[in-house]
Amino acid sequence: MKKRNLLTLLVATSFVLTGCMNDVSELYEGHAYDTGVFLQNFYSTWNDDLVNRVAPVAKTYQVTSANSFQINNQDDLENPNKLWAPDAFANSQTEEYYSLLADTPHEHTGYGYGPSNNLIGIDSSFARGFLSRLYDGRLHCDGITYAQTRVQIDGSGYGALFPKELMTYRYFALSLRGADETDNYNFDVDVNIDVTFYVYDHTNAIYVPYLFQMQNFPIMTNSGGQTSLIGFYFAGVMGADINLLRRASGLSISFEFATDYEDYTIDRNDTTEGKDHFALMLYEVLLPKSSWN
């Protein structure tokens, strides 16, 4: 009898330890990309299902300067031609604007846009794992967390599943900047960014991609902690197709140069002499006013 109880205890303990090991692994992974060495910090993980169980792209949407927004500073946030009303307001009744830089709340500067619209605040299931740093509301380097605020990608990007399915959605936004290995400071690099949402087809057990090609966005580069907030409204880009993204369960982000930069490579494995590596530093993925199930 004692042996049987001991065996049961050992089995139960093994499950507990397995869970702990998963947690430790995720914590370790989070620090693995914060080494301070540029070439060692690229995150390029793709969920296996988004590689091996994916249908051809169902639809492609063009996102240009005509149907998107780019916010670089507080004046841009308060520009009525950027975010649709009332999305820039911390208080729509008093028309008090969010602060682009402030935390929530922040004395004398109102409520922060990022902390008020982040995915963890919408659904706590986004709080776990390495990519939770993209869902925590920190739009820029805060001088404390440094590299632990961002995800550094090369052109191949990353692909991940959401913890839940997307049910309702208004707009998509991405906070980012560019970075390279040089000592040059504060300039723009034009990039095309592919943002793909994946809807799971239960009948065929496959993920169906919907691609949003964000074209020719000037991204501030080597700008310290300063970032750009770029994005689009689903209704403005998809029109009558807007319901196609309902129950989306995954997202991938990759990029290429919008023009020729001879001295750059966006391939982290490229060892061509004379080429400097270029990366996008992603700080936040936002789906404000979304709901999940």
Image: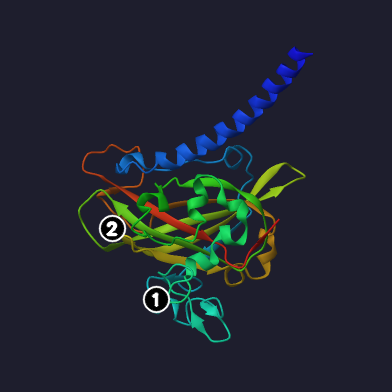
Mark 1 and mark 2 in contact? Answer it, CB < 8 Å. no
Quarter of the rendering containing residue 228: bottom left
Q: Quadrant of the C terminus?
A: bottom right
Q: Amino acid at mark 1?
A: Gln
Outermost residue, bottom side:
94
x%, y% of residue 143? 33, 58
Q: Is residue 3 above or below residue 291?
A: above
Residue 37 percent coordinates (x, y): 29, 41
Q: Is residue 269 placed above or below 79 in the rendered structure?
A: above
Residue 190 is left or right of residue 106, and the answer is: left
- Residue at 64%, 70% (x, y): give it: 239
Query: Where, by quadrant of the figure, is residue 166 drawn?
Result: bottom right
- Kindly identify the residue that appears in the image at 56 percent across and 40 percent down: 47
Tell me which residue sits at (28%, 54%) in the image. Answer: 261
Marks 1, 2: nearer the viewer = 1
Residue at point 75%, 18% (across, down): 5
Residue 198 seen from this side: no
Label 2: how many Cα within 10 Å (few below 14, some 14–19, many 20+): many
* Few, some or many residues within 10 Å of mark 1 (<14, 14–19, 20+): few
Residue beneath label 2, please? 222
Q: Nearer the viewer, residue 10 or 281?
A: 10
Q: Which amino acid does the dot numbered 2 rest on?
A: Asn
Q: Please, what secondary structure does the residue beneath circle 2 have? A: loop
Toward the viewer: 204 or 143?
143
Image: 121 above or below 29: below
**In the visual, does 160 lie left or right of 264?**
right
Mark number, residue 74: 1
